[in-house]
Image (cartoon, rainbow, N blue to C red):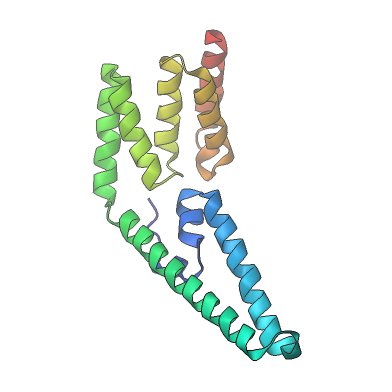
Amino acid sequence: MRVPSIASCWWPGLPQLWWRGDLRAMMLAVLFAIVLNFALTATFVWPEMVSFGMLAAIWTGVILFWGIATWTGTHEVIRIRGRSAEQQQALFSNAQVEYLKGHWLEAETLLRELLGIDQHDGDARLMLASLLRHSDRVGEALVELETLELSEAGAKWASEISRERQLAGHIQ
């Protein structure tokens, strides 16, 4: 697993977007960019565009927005880093054991916890797709396979993804 950098916290929403794929975080990052660009433009390009009081309020908002988002992002990175690679491997191993025993709910819970830590974990996503197929939740399995196929890990698992799709097709 890649360890997130504290530097990713310097842009509001980036840690949540980068490490969890949270689209609300993307909206936050874009909103911050718009407000920051407006503040910079109003300060340095067209200072006559807004009054000094309005400009002070805008910069106060930008700084507060940045501070709160940076604090939140730092806590997100600390949470992610709090799970060591050994702990994640233990979670995956436990999920494998539960999967092989046919304890679908327990295995799914562990796999979803792993994907909550690192959504790019291709091994966990493939096992989750297989588990969902075994649980007769073919639609959800196909969504997981699509997500895996579009991820960085997708190429590594191309043949397994194809096989899972074939097996899912036999169930439908």
Is 28 drawn above or below residue 157 in the view shown? below
Is residue 45 shown left or right of residue 152?
Answer: right
Residue 64 position in % (x across, y down): 47, 75
Identity of the residue drawn at 50% across and 33% down: 157
Residue 155 position in % (x across, y down): 55, 38
Is residue 79 shown left or right of residue 10?
Answer: left
Is 79 drawn above or below residue 9 in the view shown? above
Q: Quadrant of the C terminus?
A: top right
Identity of the residue drawn at 50% across and 61% down: 13
Residue 164 position in % (x across, y down): 51, 21
Q: Nearer the viewer, residue 25 or 83?
A: 25
Identity of the residue drawn at 54% across and 52% down: 24
Residue 109 position in % (x across, y down): 32, 31
Q: Nearer the viewer, residue 151 or 34?
A: 34
Q: Nearer the viewer, residue 79 or 100?
A: 79
Identity of the residue drawn at 62% across and 69% down: 33
The answer, for residue 159, to whether it is visible in the render is no
Q: So how many labels did they put on this image?
A: 0
Is residue 116 shown left or right of residue 26?
Answer: left
Where residue 47 sits, quadrant-wise, is bottom right
Q: Nearer the viewer, residue 7 or 45?
A: 45
Where residue 132 sits, quadrant-wise, is top left
Is 37 drawn above or below residue 86 in the view shown? below
The answer, for residue 170, to whether it is visible in the render is yes
Is 31 drawn above or below residue 153 in the view shown? below
